[in-house]
Amino acid sequence: MTDTRRRVKVYTLNEDRQWDDRGTGHVSSGYVERLKGMSLLVRAESDGSLLLESKINPNTAYQKQQDTLIVWSEAENYDLALSFQEKAGCDEIWEKICQVQGKDPSVDITQDLVDESEEERFDDMSSPGLELPSCELNRLEEIAELVASSLPSPLRREKLALALENEGYIKKLLEIFHVCEDLENLEGLHHLYEIIKGIFLLNRTALFEVMFSEECIMDVIGCLEYDPSLSPSRKHREFLTKTAKFKEVIPISDPELKQKIHQTYRVQYIQDMVLPTPSVFEENMLSTLHSFIFFNKVEIVGMLQEDEKFLTELFAQLTDEATDEEKRQELVNFLKEFCAFSQTLQPQNRDAFFKTLSNMGILPALEVILGMDDAQVRSAATDIFSYLVEYNPSMVREFVMQEGQQHDDDILLINLIIEHMICDTDPELGGAVQLMGLLRTLVDPENMLATANKTEKTEFLGFFYKHCMHVLTAPLLANTTEEKPSKDDFQTAQLLALILELLTFCVEHHTYHIKNYIINKDILRRVLVLMASKHAFLALCALRFKRKIIGLKDEFYNRYIMKSFLFEPVVKAFLNNGSRYNLMNSAIIEMFEFIRVEDIKSLTAHVIENYWKALEDVDYVQTFKGLKLRFEQQRERQDNPKLDSMRSILRNHRYRRDARTLEDEEEMWFNSDEDDMEDGEAVVPPSDKTKNDEDIMDPISKFMERKKLKESEEKEVLLKTNLSGRQSPSFKLSFSSGTKTNLTSQSSASNLSGSPGSPGSPGSPGSPGSVSKSTSQMAAITTKGGLVGLVDYPDDDEEDDEDEDKEETVPLSKKAKLESS
């Protein structure tokens, strides 16, 4: 059988002065060669790994607290504690430590906390104990001065603490306190306040156990009411006995547990409300008080978990329909406080806590409570649910899927949560925001588990979109049946914004589930109705939703957008915004800029073909003109597939000829006289290619001409923008109720650049005058590095880098010859 006497938990004190649980194991002591001395060893009970290996240093101060704790410091900011399961084991290890340090095991601390001066050491040898004045009313001032003078020195604090323990001095002081109160002796009461406060700063567990005992604790609190700096005195005892009421929603049969709960509440009250805020120098002197409260809480949670009768009765009454509303509210509030209490526990203890609650059926109980009419009870149940989701979302998801096989969608736990979010009566929707955060955690794939047999993500998301998504989107669909939101008040707008935020999260993190839902239910069209809301934040939420979809660059989404003409509400909102330079204006422009920069061809063509007339006059940014150029480049490639394939061949490094050969050929081309070209034929230099000369050079010459003309146009746009600066947009398109038809008909009737009727188009023959004008502009802005345009073909940068010093301007006469051919 395992020796439970040696079973311990190892704790370390973190930066926030909270104890972190490092694991459970069995402690032993022995000589460790590596450390050159007797050491404490703790091996984990789970796998036998070493949790602690600490040399018993002769100068380290070890403290024994509460009969089952040994605490010490190994470095300036590294405190350790061993919490024993049994007192016998603690005493055994304490004797080993005292044996190594040569101390009497009857002491509770083996060393002074800091080094003392030689004078104090001599003092210690010559006077082994501290003699306290007799505990009398007329000597309270002397006692208070003795306590105050002892606090700066650890050695004197130790002597004072031992004297107080050995003589039962605290109880004598509390008897005098009653006398002073009866006589209304304020001076004596003020001295007692200073004495009791000083005893707290001695930081001794043995003294705390006396002061916090049932017979003494209220008198200690009474002494602390008479702070000389405060007038009148505080009525702490009156609050604890009359105002603060202890309610047993379920009778606690264990008297030890009940006493521990009372004690912990009162000590916590002393720490938070009664004791003055400690100074920087006093803060560490109260570390034992923090530890006392912490370990008390751990004990309370453990004792409640082990009391199966108590928890069984609790959940039975929670779910019993015969339980009256007031009683149920008290039960729910107790469970909420119990869960909040668990947040102070270390991870291992918290795991055991929530596992116990899960086994007792906390989730089915919450489902019953959330279905009730009492708003306060539902609010408390929501808080409990949040603790469970934050602790283990997978546990909640598993429960939801299991109950989905047995119940209708309306009473599923997750749908009840969604309904409470939708029906939140708070004008600021505080509860709805909290619930939306919980739903987001539940549908977040990042915290979903994947095992060899099943994938939680696939199973739960499939379940959620089948059984729950329609409940979430119901308010959105109900409010967007017309061209404008049917309800546009502030609270409705806030709710819809929350729903859109969650849907946007789904678009980003879910794949085909949300895509199928959006396309099949036509969700995006309904969302874009909210662009017409009078609340800017809601319109921007709708725009953000669409921007997230476009950002995926998914052609399924793109085809859906184009088929349903879903840019129309965005363009309409852009035009209605007018010349206002605001977030709406910037967000819409950024969306179109993304389409241009990422070269999303299908959306580019759709926007230009259907909405160019509405956007062509927007010249304070180059986004829409850049889109137009992208569109024209696409058309060129479609109209001249032979040219596109030739360009690909020439730009592919694997098929390039030697750079010197190309340079010689270019020199021959540009230096040839006009007389070399007769009857419309171009002179082609010799080449190792075997293709027909005419087939190759005709598309090349046309491509060079078109590229130069396009670059000159882009440069002209840049120059114009730099000169004119930002201008207010001037729109010529007005929308009516049949906007989609108007936009489509206008775009189809317009002569886009590149159509047969558009003069100066790179794809049309053009007139000699237009060519001359373009080439003269080109010549004027040509630099050594060549032309720089707003938009270029994807591979142009490589060519420009390699041939930067070789590029020359084509003579006008040569271009004229090419055009005439």
Image (tube, rainbow, N blue to C red):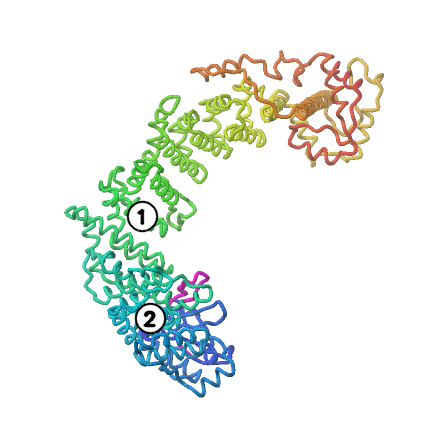
Q: Nearer the viewer, residue 143 or 438?
A: 143
Question: Residue at 39% of width from left, 23% of height from top?
Answer: 484
What is the quadrant of the N terminus in the image?
A: bottom left
Which stretch is magenta?
11-29
Please state the horizontal and vertical placement of residue 155, each as a whole percent of the image: 44, 78
Q: Nearer the viewer, residue 339 or 555?
A: 339
Q: Does residue 710 show up?
A: no
What mark, if any, has residue 192 been given in the picture? 2
Question: Residue at 62% of width from left, 17% of height from top?
Answer: 754
Q: Is residue 177 above or below residue 517?
A: below
Q: Is residue 618 above or below residue 363?
A: above
Task: Assess whether residue 61 is covered by the magenta stretch.
Answer: no
Please state the horizontal and vertical placement of residue 483, each as a whole percent of the image: 39, 21
Q: In the drawing, does residue 642 fall left or right of residue 419?
A: right
Instruction: Report the residue that reaches farthest toward the left.
Output: 322
Question: Residue at 34% of width from left, 48% of height from top?
Answer: 386
Disc 2 residue crowd, few under 14, some 14–19, many 20+, Cα 10 Å = many
Q: In the drawing, does residue 690 fall left or right of residue 294?
A: right
Q: Nearer the viewer, residue 589 or 270?
A: 270
Q: Indicate the amino acid at tag 2.
A: Leu
What is the quadrant of the C terminus in the image?
A: top right
Q: In the drawing, does residue 663 fall left or right of residue 424?
A: right
- Residue identifier under label 1: 383
Q: Indicate the amino acid at tag 1.
A: Asp
Q: CA distance from mark 1 to mark 2?
A: 44 Å
